[in-house]
Amino acid sequence: MIQETQQEKTIDTGKLIHMLSHQLKRHNSASEESSDLTHIQRHILNYILFESLGRDVYQKDLEEAFHIRKSTVTGILQLMEKNGFIKRESVEKDARLKRIVPTPKAEKRREKIMENIRATERRLKMGISKEDLETCRFVLERMLQNLSENEEPKNKSEQGGFH
């Protein structure tokens, strides 16, 4: 029989991050009663709402900001467009390039989305020192970088693309 060390008995990092992600989704679902936006859609809409105040936003921006694949972003944007939260407009210089624009329906939700995100952040950080939060953020960003460095697109359609 193999003896487990105390370190081996602890939950592995990946599982802990998965559990935290699951709790975040549950918490956000509960706080947004009957929302027609998922957790990731709320964050993406928030990004679009605020970034579009100062510049044009494109699909490639979302892929980079959220570290998600082109196909995933495409699906999310299609649903958000279908539900009336965004529209995609052709750009004058290149009709294949689509600018993502929030609709008036999305604009009305701006403050509620922001308040939900702020409340979740406050709850996440309760009882944790600023120094510990900075260390946690540094470590999480490094883990993300570690996993991203070796990631290769599965097919050519996910390699490049337009904004």
Image: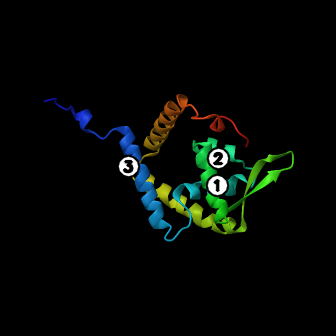
Q: Which residue is mark 1?
A: 77
In space, the residues marked 2 and 1 are separated at their CA atoms by: 10 Å
The answer to whether residue 131 is left or right of residue 52 is left
Q: Position of residue 69 (x, y in %)?
A: 59, 42
Question: Can you name the residue that lies furthest to the bottom here?
Answer: 34
Residues at circles 2 and 1 in contact by the CB criterion of under 8 Å: yes
The answer to whether residue 142 is left or right of residue 159 is left
Say what amino acid the circle numbered 3 marks.
Met
For this rendering, which residue is in front, 33 or 163? 163
For this rendering, which residue is in front, 71 or 114? 71
For this rendering, which residue is in front, 77 or 62? 77
Q: Which residue is mark 3?
A: 19
Say what amino acid the circle numbered 1 marks.
Leu
Q: Which residue is mark 2?
A: 62
Q: Residue at point 68% right, 47% down? A: 59
In space, the residues marked 1 and 3 are separated at their CA atoms by: 26 Å
In space, the residues marked 3 and 2 are separated at their CA atoms by: 24 Å
Q: Position of residue 154 (x, y in %)?
A: 57, 35
* Element under disc 1: helix
